[in-house]
Image (tube, helix red, strand yellow):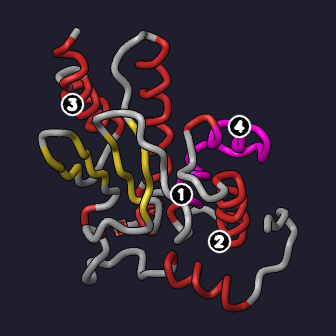
Amino acid sequence: MRIGGQAPLTSGELSSYRMAMSLPISGGGPGVPGREPTHKALDLRKMMNLGMAVEEAAGDEPITVDAIDELALEEGVDTSHLYAAAAMTTEVEFARHNDVAFVTCGGNCQHWGALECIEHLVSLRQKRIEAGKTAFDIEAKRCLDKCEHGPVVLVRSPLGTAVIARATKESLSTAVAETCDSSPADEVE
Ligand code: FES
């Protein structure tokens, strides 16, 4: 059941989200970058409510790009917020449409720019679709187990999986061009 933006959360729900987002955020301890945070993470309560909205939009099926775009308009939020919120749920899977998928961390890496990375990937994908080029899928996970290198993005392609550590717009643009422009779909054309 969908719970609206003002709905109260149970203490259990809130603490589960808090656990996922309240890792030590700097200082070089194990599992976190030794750099000061550069970005603000989404509010936990907002993310929790968006996560439930994503779950409802998905139903029992993997959620599609169109459904995420529609929900972003409906909720008046950036698309990246929905990917990050979806990453915090255990129920939502992302529909696959392409050979290549960029899997982003939507968890604590938010403190080092994960949301910007997701938004940039969404923009790149849209531009490729409009240009008639091979596109790629975007997924988000709560953690990719390489927290000290955040923001972390995995690239899954028919050639295997690559890790982009300390991802930036530039490194993501390069990875998209390198993987999608040489994908089997392009070679067939
Ligand atoms: S929080 Fe672990 S890889 Fe981002």
Which is more toward the observer, 29 or 172? 172
Residue 72 lies in magenta, yes or no? yes
- Mark 2 or mark 3: name the one nearer the start of the chain: 2
CA neighbours of label 2 inside 10 A, class few (<14), some (14 to 19), many (20+) = some
Estimate the x, y position of residue 103 in percent, counting from the top left: 35, 51
Label 3 element class: helix
Image depth: mark 3 or mark 1 in front: 3
Residue under the point 12% across and 40% down: 159
Quadrant where the image shows the C terminus: top left
User: Residue 47: which disc?
Assistant: none
Identify residue for label 3. 179
Residue range in magenta is: 67-86
Measure the C-alpha gap from mark 2 to mark 3: 34 Å
Measure the C-alpha gap from mark 1 to mark 4: 16 Å
Label 2 element class: helix
CA neighbours of label 1 inside 10 A, class few (<14), some (14 to 19), many (20+) = many
Residue under the point 65% across and 63% down: 51
Identify residue for label 4. 70
Label 4 element class: helix
Estimate the x, y position of residue 131 in percent, counting from the top left: 43, 10
Instruction: State ligand 1's quadrant.
Output: bottom left
Identify residue for label 2. 44
Image depth: mark 1 or mark 4 in front: 4
Measure the C-alpha gap from mark 4 to mark 3: 28 Å
Identify residue for label 1. 84
Residue 107 lies in magenta, yes or no? no
Estimate the x, y position of residue 5 in percent, counting from the top left: 83, 63
Residue under the point 27% across and 83% down: 29
Farthest left residue in view: 159
The vertical placement of 167 against 107, above or below, is above
